[in-house]
Image: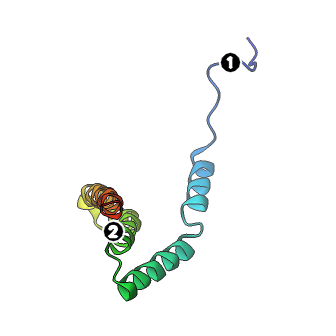
């Protein structure tokens, strides 16, 4: 039986190609995004804007999540999940505080 467009078992690319694509997209524009968040944090501190300060801190925590998973070894996954959850909760809290 030949493979056709409707064939269900499509061969997956080799793992090296997937890892290269993952590495290529993960680090793109991270430094620029981090610089924008730090500028927003500085502006929030300068103008004493509490919702923007909380939102900038939540985004910084969200950026720290991959670093925690990479460098904390056995506790990296738990710490990364904690940072992700805390970042999301802080961002939602900043939105609520913005509209109060």
Of labels 1 and 2, earlier in sequence is 1
Query: Element at badge 2?
Result: helix
Q: Which of the 4 quarters of the picture holds residue 61?
A: bottom left
Q: Which of the 4 quarters of the picture holds residue 98?
A: bottom left
3 vs 82: above or below: above
Identify the residue shown where x is 35% and y is 78%: 49
Residue 65: x and y, percent?
A: 36, 63
Nearest the eye: 27 or 73: 27
Disc 1 target residue: 7
Identify the residue shown where x is 70% and y is 17%: 6
Residue 16: x and y, percent?
A: 59, 51
Query: Element at badge 1?
Result: loop
Locate residue 83 relative to residue 29 in the image: left or right: left
Residue 21: x and y, percent?
A: 62, 54
Locate residue 16 relative to residue 76 in the image: left or right: right
Disc 2 target residue: 71
């Amino acid at each position: 039986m030949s493979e056709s467009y409707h064939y269900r078992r499509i061969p997956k690319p080799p793992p090296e190609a997937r890892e290269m694509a993952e590495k290529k997209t993960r680090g793109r524009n991270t430094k620029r995004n981090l610089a924008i968040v730090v500028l927003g944090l500085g502006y929030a501190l300068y103008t004493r804007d509490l919702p923007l300060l909380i939102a900038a801190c939540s985004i910084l925590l969200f950026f720290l999540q991959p670093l925690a998973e990479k460098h904390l070894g056995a506790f990296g996954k738990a710490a990364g999940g904690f940072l992700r959850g805390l970042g999301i909760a802080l961002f939602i809290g900043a939105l609520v505080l913005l509209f109060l």
